[in-house]
Each structure stands twice: as structure tokens, then as C-alpha cells.
Amino acid sequence: MLAPEKFSGVLTPVITPFNEDLSVNSDRLIAQCRWIISQDVGLAIFGTNSEANSLSIKEKIELLDELVENGIDPKKMMPGTGCCSLFETIELTTHAINLGVSGSLLLPPFYYKGVSDEGLYASYSEIIERIGSSNFRIYLYNIPPVSNIPISINLIDRLIKNYPNTVVGIKDSSGDWGNTKDMLDQKWDDFRVFVGSETFLLNNMRNGGSGCISATANVNPAAIRHLYQSWNNENAPNYQDKLDEVRNIFQEFPMIPALKAAAAIYSNDREWNRVRPPLLSLNKKQFEKLESNLREIKFSMPGLSKN
Amino acid sequence: MLAPEKFSGVLTPVITPFNEDLSVNSDRLIAQCRWIISQDVGLAIFGTNSEANSLSIKEKIELLDELVENGIDPKKMMPGTGCCSLFETIELTTHAINLGVSGSLLLPPFYYKGVSDEGLYASYSEIIERIGSSNFRIYLYNIPPVSNIPISINLIDRLIKNYPNTVVGIKDSSGDWGNTKDMLDQKWDDFRVFVGSETFLLNNMRNGGSGCISATANVNPAAIRHLYQSWNNENAPNYQDKLDEVRNIFQEFPMIPALKAAAAIYSNDREWNRVRPPLLSLNKKQFEKLESNLREIKFSMPGLSKN
């Protein structure tokens, strides 16, 4: 197996389709992954917006197998494999590495709060040492608004120093550009900084970042990818404005239900419009509002992609 | 199988002993459970202070089996079985019910934040309907300082109305007596309210509560049990003061590492002094301070029990 290449560009936490009995519909997931890859966007399957933490570890392992068996390229995958339990993180991550994924997006253990950097370091360190694979690439996942476990600059620095071939990047979903900028200002050697929303994509690229891993790239991949490719172009600020316009439509609603509603709308397949509790699908009024708002968007750049 | 009896009295989230390789040491766990039962205290295994969310679902299922095979009475057990994933909660809870536990302490799904009461209701409802067992007894687990998912009075009320034989109690670890009092003031019919710390035990009993489920009952079970039994006695406020004194010693330190250090001290078995990351054991200075503080306690009531 060749050493994995580091990621750059646009990835999306692929939304996870459910059947009426709430089991995963893997056919729809495979189709969604194929379409996303066709848009030159990478697969951050099992992210927050994939409802990954509403999936069992058994489901995640089976889905990884099924995706690869169905021809989805593991090299395009950065699955979320961080669990609360050390041993589940190791089991799921090892499975993903053995399938040939290029990296893992690693949530810190997120149940216990107020844990120290030292404790988080011990957690990552156990994971890395026990997995012991030269093909293991970690993209740290900083998402304090959900995990409540911020990943500090000092912690990142220590991890990079001690595991330079393993800890190769981060997704910053702090929602705070200043926090991302602090990371970029460290000038860590070829450390890949992804913003968690395309809202910060242009800023990130201008400051040496590597791209974004964004929920709305489930429905708007081509336009986001276009900004990534042309950030140095003089029209880039206009592209950013257009992306923000689409993003703002989604941010009027709870994000995951809105993404699934949009998938249902664009694919004309209402089966997409289903989430697992504790999340709830958009109600009728919200669904219609989203639909009408999406229909009104005019694009001067590569348009809102249809499913 | 007889219908389970509702809990009352004192229970403890049994601390989970680890070997040097961080695997669970089930022999020590069995011994700890036996000793706790001998003190007339119930087993809330797999609680927050058991580091349950650092255990895999596989480990939890195997441990349940091993405890019961080794003669630990499942009727004394209220295992924590609430996971982030709906299907893992169902799998673990069903396993526990089939072994004959008297109840399950159910964390809400705790990854996604800002979820609605409607969404949480949908989650509990799916769990109850899919398990479909007349022997299923839920004790809701309200621990917003850790889960960040508060369980509201309205949600409890709706659950009790719709599932009166299943939703039979709550552990309130909000740390806010006003919140517990609000619950008690609802006068729900034979709904068992447990406080999450013995600090509130006397108040809880005086207001119609059912007892406490407390971390420090791992090391101080007899004294806590004594207050539970004699809360109506004129000396009860003194007993409460003594309990608070012991509790305060632990609250100077991170609770879980301090409990394990205390178990190591009382049992003269340093193997107890081990946690899983992201937690860290007490450092040498903390350990010695705890040890010296514990040695100084004088009891006029049934004393701090030795392991």
C-alpha cells in the first residue's frame, strides 16, 4: 500500500440516508458518494453532519466495507473515526486504515468535560501508539460548539512535534476565524488546515490554508470547489459572496435536517428527508420555505449543483 | 421473570478498575460490587463516574455477563445504558433487561447539542417502543454539566404520561437543588427522584425523594446509607454535615481520579489508581494530599468504610 497523500481542497461530511425504519440506506449513500466525487469533492463520511454519532460502530464498519466494495475510492475518504471510547476509536480507525483511506478525522473523546491538554494528549498518543501504522494520518477535529472539547494550539504543537508523520492536519469548526488564523500563524510545516465552513474558505486560502470540509458541499459542491480552485483570481471575493448567500439559506434552519430536505428537493426523492432522533426533520412550513428560498438563487458562477 | 421493583435508597456508579494495558480488571470490579452490595448500596454500574463512556459497547455487554455469572445480583443493578447511537442504546439496554436488571439509567443521546424536547421525546419513544419489554424501567439521567442535554420538566411529564410503567424515575445530577425541587413539586405518582450527590440527600428525603446515586458511595457507602435510613431522625442534619465533610475532601480534586486513588488507599492496592484517557490519575502531590486528608477524618456516625 502506498503512503497516503495529504488532503487539500474541498471535502464534505456526506449526509447519511435512512430508510423508514431508520436503518441506513446504503444504496443512496453510495450514489451520493459517487456524485460528490464526480464534483471533485472528497468524502468526509461519518462527520457531524453525517449524523455519525447517531450511528453504531457496527454500522460504521459495515458501511465502510460496503462503500469500498461498491467502488468508492478509499483514497478519497477521510472518515470520522473518533469515539468516546479509546478502544472503539482504535477499532474503527484501524478498520478504515486497512481499507486504504487517506486519513481519519478524529474527534477527541467528547463525553468527559474540562479535560486537560495532558489528558487529550494521552488519548491521542494511546491511539497512535496502539494503531502503530505508518499509513495512519490524523486530521484533528476541533468543534467546540458541539464536542465542548477545544483543541488548543499547544496540544496541536506537541502532537505535531511527537508524531510529525501522523498528525498532519486539522478541521477547525470553531466557527471563529481568529482561532483558525492562530493555527495558520504557527506555520507548522505542511500542516493542513481546513475550515469547517466555506464561509472562511477565501480567508483560509489567502493565509496558507488547505481548503474546507463543509456540510453544504453536500448540495453545493461545484461552486465551493470553484472558489477553492480560483481563490487567487480577482473574482474570488464575488464567488465567496455567492457561497455565503447559499450558506445563509441553510443557516436559517437546523443544518442537518435542512441538508436532507435539500437533497430530497434536488433529487425529487422525499426518502432523503429523514433524520435519526434526537434530530427532527424540517416541518412542512420549514421545508416549503427552504424549497422556495433555494429556487430563488441566481448564480453567476458554476451553479448550485443538482443531485 | 417477576416485574422489577422500583429502586429507592443509595446507589453508586461503581468505579471501573483497569489493568496496566487499560483493559478492565473484572475480578476487582466483581469484588467492588460485592462489597458495595454488602453495604446495602445498589449498583449503578456504567455511570459517569464508572468511566462508562470510555468503555466500548462490547466491553459493557461482556462485563454485564461476567458480573451476573459471578453471582452479582442483577436486581441490584441500574446500569447506565444510554449511548449516542439509538441502536447501541437499544442493544445494550435489551441485553441488560434480559439479564434481569431492575432498571436502566438512561443518558440522553449527548453528541448533538441544542436538540429540542420533541427530538429527545422521539429518541426515548423509539427506544421504548423498539425494546417493547414489560420489564423495562427507565431512570432518566439529567446531568447537563457533562451531557449538555438538560431534561426538562415538560419532557419528563410527557414521558410519564405516555409510558407510566416504563419511565419510573430520574437521577438529577444538575447540581442544582432548585431543579430537583421543581421535579419533586410535580408530585408525579410514585416517580423516584434521586439526587446525584449525597449533598442533597437530606433535602431530597424531606421533600419526598427516593435517595441518591452518588460517586462517593464507592468509598463511603455505609455513612450515606445511614443518613438515608435515618433522615427523619433528629440527628440527621449532623449526619448530613459529616457526609458533606467527606464529599468536600473529594471535591478538591477531579472526582473520578480521586475516587480511584481513595480505593487504592483503602484497599492498599495501587492497581486501583488508574484511569483511561482523557482522564488522568492524580499526581503524586494530589495523591498524598488526598491520603492525608482522608486519614484525618473523625466520624461520630458509622465510619468511612474500608475497602
Image: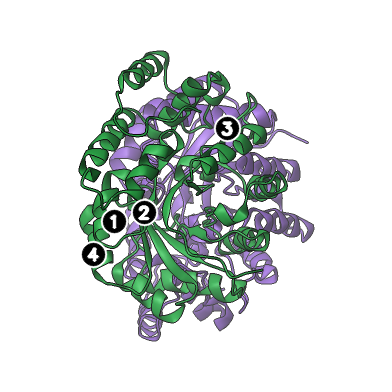
Chain colours: A green, B purple
State yes or no: discs 2 and 1 in contact (Cβ < 8 Å). Answer: yes
Of labels 4 and 2, earlier in sequence is 4
Q: Residue beneath label 1, please?
A: A205
Q: Which mark is residue A113?
A: none
Confirm whether circles 3 and 1 share one chain.
yes
User: Is B190 situated above or below B67?
Assistant: above
State yes or no: discs 2 and 3 in contact (Cβ < 8 Å). Answer: no
User: Is A34 situated above or below B29?
Assistant: above
Whole-number angstrom distance, CA of label 4 to CA of label 2: 16 Å
Looking at the rendered image, the quarter that the N terminus of chain B falls into is: top right
Whole-number angstrom distance, CA of label 3 to CA of label 1: 32 Å
Q: What x and y, as percent, mark residue B12?
A: 52, 56
Q: Chain of mark 3?
A: A
Q: Residue beneath label 2, please?
A: A211
Q: Chain of mark 2?
A: A
Q: Residue beneath label 4, please?
A: A182
Of labels 2 and 1, earlier in sequence is 1
Q: Which mark is residue A17?
A: 3
Q: Amino acid at mark 1?
A: Met
Whole-number angstrom distance, CA of label 2 to CA of label 3: 26 Å
Q: Amino acid at mark 2?
A: Gly
- Label 2: which secondary element: strand
Of labels 3 and 4, earlier in sequence is 3
Q: Amino acid at mark 3?
A: Pro
- Label 3: which secondary element: loop
Looking at the rendered image, the quarter that the C terminus of chain B falls into is: bottom right
State yes or no: discs 3 and 4 in contact (Cβ < 8 Å). Answer: no
